[in-house]
Amino acid sequence: MWDDDFKESKAIRSTTEHTLLGLQTVLVGDSLARYTIWDGIRALDYLAARPEVDQARIGVTGNSGGGTHSSYLGSLEDRLAAVAPSCYLTTRRRLLETIGPQDAEQCVLNSIADGLDHPDFVLSAAPKPFLMLVAIRDFFSIAGARDTFAEAQRVYDSIGEAARLAKFEWDDGHGYSRPRREAAYRWFSRYFEGKEDASPEAPVEVLDERELWATTSGQVALEFAAANRTVYDLHIARMEQFRKQQPAEPSVATTRQFVKFAPAGNSAAPRTQAYGDVHAGAYRIEKLMYESEPGIQVPALLYLPAAPAASGLLPATIFVYGAGKASAHADAAALASSGKGAALTIDVRGFGETRAIPENYGSDWPRYFGDYESSMTALLTGKPLVAMRAEDIARAVDLLAGRREIDASRIAARGREMGAIPVLYTAAFDARIRSVALERSVPSYEAIARHRIHRQQWENAVAGALRHYDLPDLERAMSLRRVEWIEPLYPNGRLMPKRQR
């Protein structure tokens, strides 16, 4: 993502670049790894074509992201005779319990749903020689690395190849340090030379980066601009190909099934627990917690006029604001104070009181990606976070419909920022929501795919959405019901001209 004006990347660091591109490929239904793995396979093609290379003795090793791709290539490429990834392999469970799913090319869509775990990289490489290089104080869990080795060891033992699997640990942190490098030399020499070379690593002069450039400028994007196709170019082409194959108006039922929207309760009122009332002159607030699905509690505030409605039943609006229900207080209080309606403000999973990450979490990650960990983990399970949040909103409709003060035929919803698209999904699938207002949100997934820089969009990601539908299709599914877009945004966070239907 080189920017020639600034002579640096458009993003702050490589992992940010990967994950900006990763969302765009996810929307087209691809894991970013499909591109990075292919680069590795083509590198192997080139190496195997060299006259001085023995094709029977080619191995792969690397550290961190290189450990990731060593694991990928070792499991996928039969031409590789030995594998030695460093500082990557752990277990999925330990990863999620510690540092989270990691950047986009390390996350294969649906892998949790499909039962793919880190030991499978080793097992699919069997029986080729496989050395796990591990740092005891790595941020990749050492406990997970030991669990993966133990599982793989049982399989290697069962096929009579116990000697072909090994693990080398060193008491240091993340990096391809000298002890791990020398362990790799011993491993490759054992299988490529027939004897283990235990001699120490020779001194190496560290060359200046410029001396290692294969291009004059150090940037392929500059020197091969006319012929070079980036991941961005490739995924745009794939998106356009899939968009041509879509039906003119995707069915609501098909889209609902695709995102796995399935609220619990079959429209019955959810179980709620009351936490007291707050009386504030012209209105009062009931503090509630309702169960969206087993194990998922949603904090909520129900605002009601202090005086009974003259007409008997009140219309109601559900407020879903990305900054949490507290940020909707003024709007909800104004509605209830006017006597013209009730308001329900909710913290769907990941908002407000249920927020999974602190506001100061890590470097630039939240500024670009919001609650990336929850979003990506959901995609690994095969069900997007936005669908889970939409289910929380549908259960809020159930809650209102079961209240004696509420006119169930006059329920509206208002979503702001990260709350807007979950509201749109819910309204498209639940006709009880009679109108929606969507504030400060991108109006389409295609816009995210086409913008080179996007911010705060991962939480609404649906893997493969652009193969089947886009957000305007959800809006059309609402038929004659009212949809209002307020201050819509470009994917980079800047305001677009207002539009209303």
Image (cartoon, helix red, strand yellow):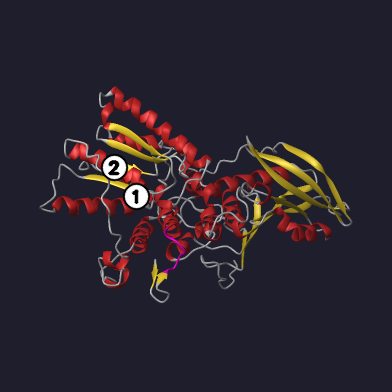
- Which structural element holds mark 1? helix
Q: Amino acid at mark 1?
A: Gly
- Residue 203 location in percent, x, y? 27, 53
Give the residue at the far left of this rendering.
51
- Residue 482 location in percent, x, y? 63, 61
Q: Count all numbered tags in the image, as a single digit.
A: 2
- Which structural element holds mark 2? helix
**Marks 2 and 1, the one that precedes in the sequence:** 1
Q: Is residue 13 magenta?
A: yes
Q: Is residue 215 above or below residue 432?
A: below
Q: Amino acid at mark 2?
A: Ala
Residue 56, quarter of picture: top left
Q: Tell me the crowding category of disc 1: few under 14, some 14 to 19, or many 20 or more residues within 10 angstroms, Cα based.
A: some
The residue that mark 2 highlights is 184
Checking the image for residue 66, the label placed there is 1
Q: Is residue 417 visible?
A: yes
Range drawn in magenta: 9-14
Residue pictured at 48% horizontal, 59% vertical: 445
**Observer-nearest of 197 and 17:** 197
Q: Tell me the crowding category of disc 2: few under 14, some 14 to 19, or many 20 or more residues within 10 angstroms, Cα based.
A: many
Horizontal side, residue 134 vs residue 422: left or right: left
